[in-house]
Amino acid sequence: MSALTNAIEILRCFSSARPDLSFADVMALTGKPKSSTSRLLRSLRDCGLLEQDPHTRRYRPGLLTFELGRLHRAHDDLISMAERELREVCARTGHTGYIAVLDGFEQVVLRIVPGSNPLRVVNPPGQRTPALATSNGRAMLARLSDDDIRARVPTTYPKLPRNSPQNFKQLIARLDEIRRTGVSEAADESIEGVGSQGFALKSGETGEMIGIAVSYSVQATTAAERANVRRELAAMAAKLRRLTGDPLDQDTARIQTGTR
Amino acid sequence: MSALTNAIEILRCFSSARPDLSFADVMALTGKPKSSTSRLLRSLRDCGLLEQDPHTRRYRPGLLTFELGRLHRAHDDLISMAERELREVCARTGHTGYIAVLDGFEQVVLRIVPGSNPLRVVNPPGQRTPALATSNGRAMLARLSDDDIRARVPTTYPKLPRNSPQNFKQLIARLDEIRRTGVSEAADESIEGVGSQGFALKSGETGEMIGIAVSYSVQATTAAERANVRRELAAMAAKLRRLTGDPLDQDTARIQTGTR
DNA sequence: GACAAGGTTCCGAAATTTGGAACTACCTTG
DNA sequence: CAAGGTAGTTCCAAATTTCGGAACCTTGTC
């Protein structure tokens, strides 16, 4: 196992649930011996990937990660174009917008557009969630082949909220529905009382894919209002697909004929 | 040289001026042979620290750096406290506020509070600038001992804008002035026509130090307006120093008696 | 089809990493 | 104040990685 692999293993221990870790935490999470952990933490701290609180001696991501993080897709055309459109939709509807990317079977929030409605933002940028339990996450999965999806989902199907697909078969059924109707919807899944609608956008040029969603309180919205969101999203999707040359049709054909 | 050192060397090649790099760029910047560069880039990509554009094949910071970057000092009390105060000052004065940290002889912008005045934001978070050429950068340096400063400034004194200190002696004179008057000001340095005033804040508890500045257009502000900014900053500094237990007096005494 | 740019793979020598154990430092508790 | 615990550091020889030159592949171009 290379030094880099070990370093990454430590870095991956940090998350919004665990933004800082003690020496013992890292040892427990990685299962590595004390001496190795000690050396590696020191290296990571010295190079700026981690910082150490001089008082509590706990470790947290360092200045270098902050700098690099700011650079991540800073000039990404697909994302900035989508964000611009999403801003307008959010301004009109008052709801909160999300842009996320797929990573394995999880998604990571890249951008958030706060709405005017008072719904607390629970998924800040950088947040990692199972893609199976969100509208835009499933919309992205729906554009992959079933084989590809199978390879992403862990062998032991994860425990998900009540309204999310509870096993692989349910998941595929749900994705088929998205492929058929072109609409991906979620309600009361990751967060109780919160619903969302989303779609996936793929650049014809670079092939990169993002998931776009609008999120709202289920209690505080009427069926008519949700239908309005659906229309807004459909219009936005159509416009963005045209602008980015999204190969949606080819993808759908590829999946339906079972071509890899 | 460890694998981690090499990895960091590559990561440090990225900056806002160079947000993505080709294989050849990395080779040229690090001076490493092709085979080593190839292996290392692949590792960095596989572990998520870098991404590769499938079309142009250029590398850029990856999803993992984005996630970790969002975690960096997310729960830092000193910064969030300072940001809260800065927001109020910026709302009252209409100018743009900055919070930065010192790293060697450079500073990195952590937070920015846009003002209501139409002054384009040129230093987004993550931006790295010589601390010698900014008001809050010099304010931070002024709290270090002259020996410490000497160790940070490169042996060949860097080429700085016209109004910045042009050599080590000028720098020390300027820092002494900050130590005496408690005021750090800059005008027409990093950016033509832009002035700023700043101060350094140090937590008595953790010892961490940040630089806080308010920035404005020199042409568009009167001397009276700048005096108002000075008063606002002085009040803010006093309040924050009280709240954080800033050991300013001890630091000053330590520097003046030449104690390490 | 030759050429160049960009990149990968191979291999033995050289350097680094590994992890157990011994050691240090600093609290806390009886 | 001794004993015990936590948090780490340092040491060392064995095991594993990395290193870089050279040969090799791939893709686009003239």
Image: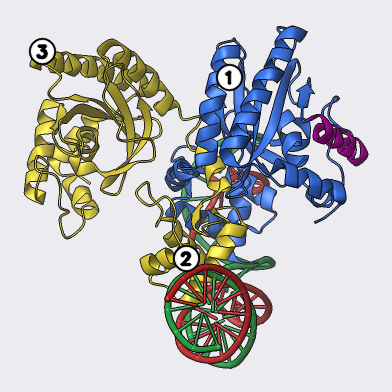
Chain colours: A blue, B yellow, C green, D red
A150 with respect to B210 (left or right):
right
Q: Where are the magenta residues, as a range?
A: A166-181
Would residue B232 be visible to someone looking at this image? Answer: yes
Q: Quadrant of residue A225?
A: top right
- Percent position (x, y) of residue A45? 47, 51
Say which residue appears at 77% left-offset and 27% top-offset: A183
Q: Chain of mark 1?
A: A
Q: Residues within 10 Å of mark 3 (few under 14, many from 20)?
A: few
Q: Which residue is mark 2?
A: B23
Q: Residues within 10 Å of mark 2 (few under 14, many from 20)?
A: some
Q: Are marks 3 and 2 on the same chain?
A: yes
Label of residue A89 in the image: 1
Q: Amino acid at mark 3?
A: Ala
Q: CA distance from mark 3 to mark 2?
A: 53 Å
Which element is circle 2 on? helix
Q: Residues within 10 Å of mark 1 (few under 14, many from 20)?
A: many
From the viewer's side, name the closer residue of D17 and C28: D17
Q: Chain of mark 3?
A: B
- Percent position (x, y) of residue A23? 58, 47
Which element is circle 3 on? helix
Of labels 2 and 1, the one closer to you: 1
Of labels 3 and 2, the one closer to you: 2
Q: Main secondary structure of the magenta part?
A: helix
**Residue B135 located within the stretch drawn in magenta:** no
